[in-house]
Image: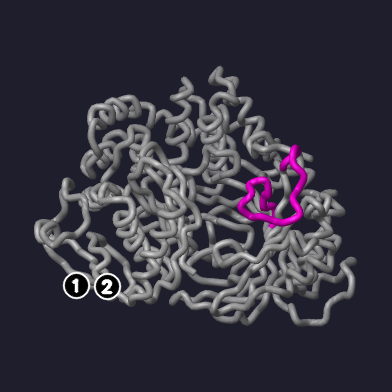
Amino acid sequence: MNRKELINKYIKFFESKGHKRIENKSLIPQNDPTVLFTTAGMHPLVPFLLGQKHPSGKKLVNVQRCIRTGDIDSVGDETHHTFFEMLGNWSLGDAEAPRASDTSKSSGLQGYWKKEAINFSFEFLTKILKINKEKLAISCFNGDENISKDEESAEIWISLGVAKNRILFLGKEANWWGPAGKTGPCGPDTEMFYWKSKDKKAPQKFDSEDKNWVEIWNDVLMEYEKDENGNYKKAKQKNIDTGMGVERTLTVLNGLEDNYLSDAFLPLIKKIENLSGKKYSENKREIRIIADHIKASVFIINDGINPSNSEQGYVLRRLIRRAIRYGKKLGMTNFCSKIAKDVFVIYDEYSFNVSNIINTIKEEEEKFLLTLEKGIKIFDKISNKNITGKEAFLLYQSYGFPIEMTIEFAKEKEISVDEKGFYEESSRHSELSRTASKGRFSSGLADNSDKTTKLHTATHLLHSALRKVLGDNVKQKGSNITPERLRFDFSFDRKITEEEKNKIEYLVNEAIKNKLEIVKEEMSPKEAKNFGALGFFEHKYGDKITVYTVGKGKTQFSKEICTGPHVKNTIELGKFKIIKEESSSSGVRRIKAILE
């Protein structure tokens, strides 16, 4: 099945159930200033999910173009993308109103709730896409201290013939959606997984950790709204919001293991092979990054954004320059606009301003090529040691290296970059938007919510626990925090054992249970060093810095230089849980963790 067939089948199916097809909106959000891009199919619908009447009625369907930049450093594997298309169907309110007893055509005036949404999903997967139900598994929300377990959804799936052993209840990190920005509609979800292995038969019992199970669809049951204080309250209007990623589903339906081999990417892959003379099979990461970033750049430019040093323009500039950098590794120059032309062919149903897109990409490529070689030579000269903030800013200001590119170069050399020093330097020169340092680029959100604050505080506890368990050689190498999870990179040369992981979790949770007060103090760098605060004293700080101390006297748990924000007491954090520990680069490990 090709991309257009999948989209058409989906749209026609839901139109037959009384849904009205709605417009594919711009990548630049109109209703949410807290995010840079449209990150999900529901994003343009937020006002209608909150109660405003949609002109097309209460039952809607569409395919929506989206951009996500939160895990851009994961692009290069077989599943991650910056640009993607999301199929979605919605019920806007009226969940409790009398509903049709079957799933035949209706006027579109009635809303629907869990039973109808799950029935639609099951019917589309098994009847339209012809997926054997024996290759399907389901996850539902396990509940927490505030919200009950979603037994109702599980019972509906069982009534449709899904085996009980194929239904798994998972926590908020896996089966809760949203909001898309800082505030808004959200709720538990039920997700559908497909067994992708051709060699092994799907096991009777569903194990979400088994990578042969691939998530292909998500039904979000929007019953709640999150407010500015991070609190969840019952929504005035219940909604159904579902999402099916086009690229991932195409991969599954065509029996592929690699998203980049479906028709949504294959023409770009072949063009890069042709231009570079290199085989995809031997250069997968580089070719995937180039294909992904140029595709995303085409769509961002088409929605009115030009490369710049702020907001969406900064993201666009970084994507193009990162593509150029990897193209150079494959021996290509002046190639981006040639690959862009194949994007127009793949997505020929979209209306593109072709000349503007080509000229914008050419201009940005020519500009960067003038300084790239010189910048690489400078980087090579200074990379015999860790890169200071001033050096990173020089690479940005004089040679056009986005800070993220410098960090990427540094990882390859197994050295670190003083990011904090870079932002201090850039703010003094007023050259660079604070986009990245505020988190809008790294997480996709301009978010300083309670959840993010708690996770930020938890990184300090994690850092201290790692040093207590693994030794004082452990140092922070980077972090990224979204409202859902924290990601923490640290220097260590091997995988941590299960026993060590459990001990780290235990220490963090003990610090939380002990209700340790968190004290903020301002002092000079010299005083901080004498005070025993953790920091990178080989880098230059200003005259005054902020030190956060967790606990006091015998109960002191950590003391670290930081700009915040933090909670007042560790008891606010809840329960700390490590969900993944993996390699980030040579000599650097990565932990992803959540607060329950």
The total of numbered circles placed on residues is 2
Q: Provide the residue designation for mark 1.
A: 553
SS type, badge 1: helix
Q: Is residue 591 magenta?
A: no
Q: Are marks 1 and 2 in contact (CB under 8 Å)?
A: no
555 over 420 or under it: above or below = below
- Image quadrant where one finds the N terminus: top right
- Mark 2 belongs to which amino acid? Ile
Residue beneath the point at 38% across and 75% down: 513
Tell me the CA gap for discs 1 and 2. Answer: 13 Å
Tell me if 503 is positioned left or right of 300 in this view: left
- Residue at the far front in the pictured view: 499
Query: Could you tell me residue 122's position as x and y percent?
Result: 80, 60
Tell me if 141 is positioned left or right of 442 in this view: right
Between 390 and 345, the one nearer to me in the picture = 390
- Mark 1 belongs to which amino acid? Gly
Query: Could you tell me residue 283's position as x and y percent?
Result: 54, 26
Q: Which mark is residue 93?
A: none
Instruction: Give the dominant element type of the magenta stretch: helix, strand or loop.
Output: loop
Residue 318 visible in the displayed image: yes
Q: Provide the residue designation for mark 2.
A: 518
564 over 234 or under it: above or below = above
SS type, badge 2: strand
Between 9 and 525, the one nearer to me in the picture = 525
> What range is drawn magenta here?
197-217
Task: Give the mark toward the camera: 1 or 2.
Answer: 1
Pointer 2: residues within 10 angstroms few (<14), some, or many (20+)? many
